[in-house]
Every structure is written in structure tokens, then in C-alpha cells.
Image: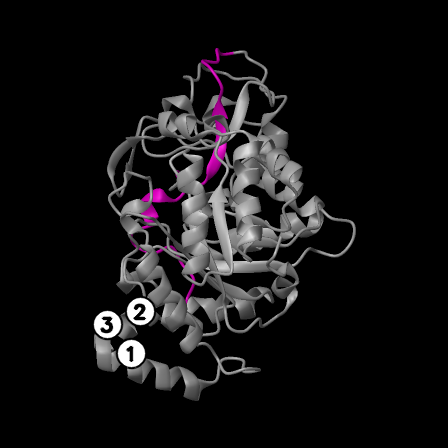
Amino acid sequence: MSFDFSKMTSSRPLPPIVVAEVGTAHGGDLSRGLELIDAAADAGSDIAKVQVVFAEEILPPEAGLVPLPGGDTPLYEVFRKLERPVDFYAALADRAAARGIGFLASPFGEKSVCLLEEIGVEAWKVASPELNHEPLLERLARTGLPLILSTGVSRMEDIQRALDVIADSVSAAVPPIIILHCLTNYPAPEKEANLRAIPTLAAAFNHPAGLSDHSLHPVLIPALASALGAVMIEKHITLNKEAGGLDDPVALTPEAFTEMTAAVRRFALPEGGRGTAAHLAAVIDELAGEYGRERVEACLGDGVKRLAPSEEAHYRRTNRSIHAVGALKAGTLLTEENTAILRTEKVLRPGLEPRYRSEVYGSRLIRNVASGDGITREDLEPSDVAPEDHKK
């Protein structure tokens, strides 16, 4: 890889590392994927990032339609069509290296992790819905490679638990970690951005923090995040906002992405700085002159990390829980084979969080569970699973 991932071990890489989130905008077409890698490099990004999707690792077939920027989407079927072999991703990684930028990917389970290990990646990106996917976190932590954790649709206690899981999974030093503030909504409302949460997260968890941004404007939120000391800024890129990809409507065109990277570097903290109030005030004044002070202040927020109003309905549905694989009858002994840790989305019933899997495995159902539904406490003998502690 051409990008020096050792920069991610620094407490303050300057200017921010810019990640072009290609995601699945390639549509499964290699030539389009290569063109997107080129566009990311031409637009000034440091890293091009993709998502390695295998539908069975992400959500149940019964998940139905999922509301996305392009409309209600049969997401399981779309993910199935996007599945590609190792050679596809190896070609994208090779193109990134040839263009002098890094290659990063989000895995969603053991199959995608193994694929990326075959390629030879140098860091891992954990998407927001996987922050509570404890088996995945444990698996990634044991590789010793740097971890980038997005924290959309999560609370402070969720982030702390993920960090504890990572620390408990390794016998040596904890791998380098970057925490990305994120608002999991597409598009993300500017007034809910709460960008002051970036330094909050860095101070609370003693890891460098950055931003994964799903807002529509190419400059405003990335520039403010840069001035606040974000060490990494990730944003979707697309060749055409109307190309039909899952995230294309909220992604930046190459021209807009170029504008963003220039703004991020222009407004970054001065070399060696750690978030000086004077620098931030000057940036706020300049951006307020262009976009209006009220709009700028709304983006900054109060810095208290919490679920944004637009995220609340997604909590415990976008995140992972334990689901039935196939219809399970009362009396069934639950195992890793007849259950899976998946996203619930909007139709199915959420199950117990992955943290309870050791109690769930080996328990018997006291009632039937439909295929794809979550395994709840009420499905098990009352003594089998300890009470949950994630309630509001």
C-alpha cells in the first residue's frame, strides 16, 4: 500500500487523513470501481475505501424493504448482487497503490475478513452498525492492525463497551484506534451534526477522533471538523449522484470531493496545534460570513455525544442483534449454526445484543421464532439470560 498507515498511530496527524468512501458505488462493475479509485486519487484523498459485502453477513433475507436515499430498497437482494470474489477487491487495492493512495475496507463478518486478509490490508474500518458486533471486533483486534471505529447510532456507553471488547481480545498492546464521530442518517441533517463531539470523544476515550460525514454540503461540515481537530474525515464519493448506487444520492461528485479536500486542508489546525480556540474562532467567523452564523453554530452543537433525533428510530435496528436462521420451533437448542448476529432493520423484531450470545447459545426456546426474527429474552427460559443493561 502506498499510504503510510503509521500516520494513524499518531495522536495528531495533520492535516486530517481524507478517506474517499467508494462503498459499493462501483455497482459490482470492476471498470467503474477502478474509475472511482482514480477519481478518489485525483480529488486529493489519502485513502480510497470500499465495503466488502456478503448479504448473509449483514442482515436476514426476511429484512424486506429498507428506506435508503434512493427509496425503499430490498437490501438483502441488492447485497447479493454486489457480492464479488477476492480478485475484484485485489484489483481495486492494486489500483489504489498504483495511484499512490491507501486502500481501506469495511468487513462485516468472518468471510469478508478472510477475503481482506488474503489481499493483505493494513487497517480495518468498522462501520457504525457493527460497533456492537463483538465477535467481529474481537476478530479484528487479534490481527493487531489499526482500527477505525465509526460511532453513528451509538451512545457513549456503547463506544466504551466496544473499546473494552477490543482491549480484552488482545494479550499485547491494544492496536491503534481512531474514533469517528458519525450521524447515521442519509442524508445527515446539518443541525444534528454536533461537531463539537469530535474533541469530546478524543478526550473521553484517549484516542484520536475524526468524522464520517453523510451531510450533503461538500465544505461546511468537513471544514468545521478539520478546524476542531479531526484527524480523519471520511465522505462518500460517486461518479454520478443519479447512478443508482445505495449511497450515490448523498455522495460527492469528484469535483465536489476536490473542493472538500481543499477546504479540509485549508482549515486544518496549524502544525503542532491541539485545537486552539483562536484558530477555531477565526474559522467560524470566516464560514459564518459565507454560510451564516446561525447555520454554522447549529452544525457545531453542544459537544455532548448522544443519539441524534434522526437516529433514535434506528437504535437497536441498524445495530446488530441475535437472529434466527430459519424458522425455529419451541424446544430448539440455540447454537451458532441456527442463529446469526445481524442487523434487524425496519421489519423484523430485534433480538438480544451480541454481548449475550454466550448465554443464548445452549439455551432452549420456549416458543416458536419466525425465520429472521430476533431472539428475545421472552423466547427463552427466564433464568437463561441475564437482564439487559442497554435500556434508555
Q: Earlier in the sequence, mark 3 or mark 1?
A: 1
How dense is the environment of label 2, judged by Cα within 10 Å: few (below 14), some, or many (20 and up)? many
Q: Is residue 272 left or right of residue 24?
A: right
Q: Return the residue found at the far bottom.
A: 278
Q: Given contact means CB atoms under 8 Å apart, are the residues at marks 1 and 2 in contact?
A: yes
Q: What residue type is labelled 3?
A: Arg
Q: Which amino acid does label 1 sit on?
A: Leu
Task: Write down the region rendered in magenta.
Answer: 303-330
Mark 1 → mark 2, Cα distance in angstroms: 7 Å
Q: Main secondary structure of the magenta part?
A: loop
Point 49% across, 80% down: residue: 275
- Tell me the residue that label 1 is attached to: 287
Q: Is residue 112 left or right of residue 181?
A: right
The image quadrant of residue 28 is top left
Q: In this view, does 209 lie to the left or right of 255?
A: right
Point 65% across, 39% down: residue: 117
- Tag on residue 295? 3
Assess whether residue 302 is covered by the magenta stretch. Answer: no
Q: Given contact means CB atoms under 8 Å apart, are the residues at marks 3 and 1 in contact?
A: no
- Tag on residue 169? none
* Residue 327 pos. (x, y %): 45, 13
Point 66% across, 43% down: residue: 120
For numbered disc 1, what is the local secondary structure? helix
Q: What residue type is labelled 2?
A: Leu
Assess whether residue 321 is covered by the magenta stretch. Answer: yes
- Tell me the residue that label 2 is attached to: 220
* Residue 305 pos. (x, y %): 43, 62
The image quadrant of residue 12 is bottom right
Looking at the picture, tell me which residue is in the foreground, 160 or 67.
Answer: 67
Question: Is residue 346 among what the camera can see?
Answer: yes
Q: Given contact means CB atoms under 8 Å apart, are the residues at marks 2 and 3 in contact?
A: yes
Q: Earlier in the sequence, mark 1 or mark 2?
A: 2
